[in-house]
Amino acid sequence: MQIHSAITPLRKLLKSVRQEGKSIGLVPTMGNLHAGHMELIKQAKSKTDFLVCSIFVNPLQFGVNEDLGSYPRTLAEDSQKLELENCDCLFAPSVDEIYGATLEAHTLVQVPELTENFCGRSRPGHFDGVATVVLKLFNIVQPDIAFFGLKDYQQFLLIQKFTEDLSLDIELVGVETQREPSGLALSSRNNYLNDEQRQSAAFLYRTLRDSAEQINSGHLDFPALEKAAQLALQAHGLKPDYFSICNARTLRPATAEDRQLVILAAAFIGPTRLIDNIRWQRSD
């Protein structure tokens, strides 16, 4: 596996890969790789000829009082995991390499409407940072296909939107959320949880499933379901940020006529904020 921290030699490498007629895949990550990331790598390897995995803890997507400084950085271990999965190239740039010396004055990419609620409302500026760094990675790597986990479903939709809006010739593949046996969605932030908190955190997914089952049984009073779910989370030691039943394509509040649904949820357990979702097509 080749490892690059600078843009110019990476571009030189990828130019030669294209000249050989090979397809290029990209898996953007912030590192601290777990089984969910490895599933992205496996799927990317099966669909492309040459795979680039990026590891970059992006300061633009962290708020003032968020965990940028404490976010787990495990580059040596991550490199070993990528080697074992036969990743072709690791791109691990510095902040200066991506943004130069004037981070505060850097151009930002903004995606309207989709980013106004949920994580966008709770974390102002977060999605501007996500969209900016992902577009930069797209321009640096110029992949044929890029792979993203669907745990960050709102994020995936905004990347879909700007890819379409800006006429980028990149196929996007969303990979299903990988979970612990308890149902807890795999996340680097799970490392912040102790054993008791991890057990409580698993209730977030159970609540998502219970709500979906009630909808499938004909309970279509969505505001009532949302309120009941938030109360249930509180009763299990979680502090809900949001629990919202939405149209899966627009993220607007769901109506009884919507067939493609998503329930988006975020909750704190202690200081740790976890997100999850469940998506399905109604058959009733």
Image: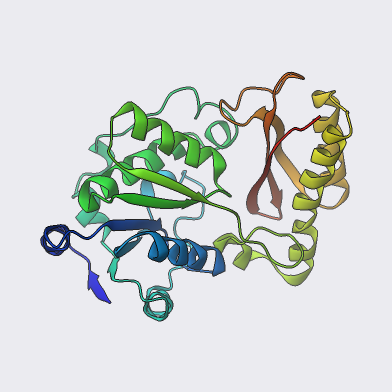
Give the percent coordinates (x, y) of residue 154: 54, 38
Q: Residue at x 88, y 28 (%)?
A: 219
Residue 243, above or below 50: above
Front residue (pair 167, 158): 167
Q: Residue at x 55, y 63 (%)?
A: 36
The residue located at (24%, 72%) in the rendering is 3
From the viewer's perspective, is 112 left or right of 270?
left
Coordinates of residue 40 in the picture (x, y in percent): 47, 61
Tell me if residue 242 comes above or below residue 45 in the rendering: above
Please state if 91 lies on the left or on the right of 148 as rendered. Answer: left
Q: Is residue 12 left or right of residue 124?
A: left
Which quadrant is home to the N terminus?
bottom left
Q: Along the line of sight, which residue is nearer the eye, 70 or 45?
A: 45
Which of the 4 image quadrants contains residue 14?
A: bottom left
Report the number of numbered marks.
0
Compared to residue 171, the image places residue 36 above or below, namely: below
Image quadrant for the C terminus?
top right
* Viewer can see residue 125: no
Image location (x, y in percent) of residue 105: 24, 37
The color scheme shown is rainbow
Residue 70 image offset from top left, x and y in percent: 49, 63
